[in-house]
Image (cartoon, grey):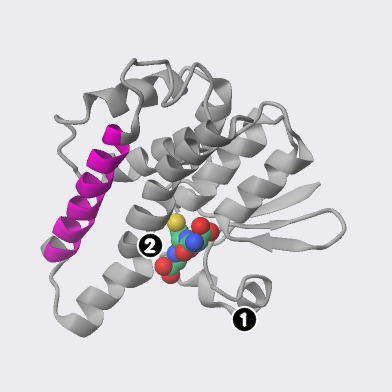
Amino acid sequence: MMVLYSYWRSTTSYRVRIALNLKGLAYETRSVDLVAGAQHAPEFAALNPSQGVPALALEDGSVLTQSMAILDYLDALAPEPALLPADPLMRARVLAAAHVIALDIHPVNNLKIVGRLKGEHGASDEDGVAWMQHWMCEGFRAYTRLLPYEAHRFSFGDTPLLCDLCLVAQLYNAHRWGVDMSEFSRLLEIEAEAMKLDAFQRAKPEAQPDASS
Ligand SMILES: N[C@@H](CCC(=O)N[C@@H](CS)C(=O)NCC(=O)O)C(=O)O
């Protein structure tokens, strides 16, 4: 069985958990406690040189890292339901929306970045939260503008795609850090649709074996 190295509150792990569930792929979760610094332990750093979650160990012992590469692998391994549309233009649009979250929001708000702002650059806890809220709002505005004019159940249609996985995980983080979501009602509607699905319910942070650790 595949082993997912994950942390319950990690949004990058959350994306991958949703995909594994949507595709009906069995996996076992191994917790990497980011708050305790377990990502820096030599055994884990040997698996993922970037010292972050997720990492996915395959049955043959290969280890995959980088959530977007893992999602791409899973989509190739188990093509249904597809995470990207076949049409090249739509595929580029869905990828662009996913990248707003995965490449614009997540990296600047990562634990190690905010930790360094506080530890090395004198930022207070409040500064750290304001920083994260700022980049989430910027990204959510951009994401919203990329959506098609007519509303669907999910961002680009009636099934969840790669960008929806990234969005729902990021929205968990937005709620956690108290982002004012009043201007993002469309995103909240997408989140509510997603949460009707068992694949999302089983992937949510609170449902993980290491929740609250
Ligand atoms: N680009 C990587 C980022 C992985 C990553 O850094 N994940 C976060 C959790 S969401 C983490 O493990 N952070 C640890 C840290 O900042 O020390 C991916 O998408 O997999």
Q: Residue at x 64, y 52 (%)?
A: 70
- Residue 100: give x, y in percent of width and height: 37, 48
Q: Could you tell me if the residues under marks 2 and 1 are in contact, i.e. CB atoms within 8 Å?
A: no
Q: Residue at x 62, y 55 (%)?
A: 69
> Secondary structure under badge 2?
helix
Label placed on residue 42:
1
Is residue 9 in view from this perspective?
no
Above or below 31: residue 82 = above
Q: Residue at x 41, y 56 (%)?
A: 103
Relative to 105, is 45 on the left or the right? right
- Residue 46: give x, y in percent of width and height: 67, 77
- Along the line of sight, the residue nearer the viewer: 153 or 95: 95
Location of residue 86 (image quadrant): top right
**In the image, farthest residue toward the front:** 89
Relative to 117, is 69 on the left or the right? right
Residue that numbered label 2 is attached to: 107
> Secondary structure under badge 1?
helix
Location of residue 26 (image quadrant): top right
Mark 1 crowdedness (10 Å alpha carbons): few <14, some 14-19, many ≥20: few
Tell me the kind of residue under disc 2.
Pro
Q: Residue at x 55, y 61 (%)?
A: 32
- Residue 13: give x, y in percent of width and height: 53, 50
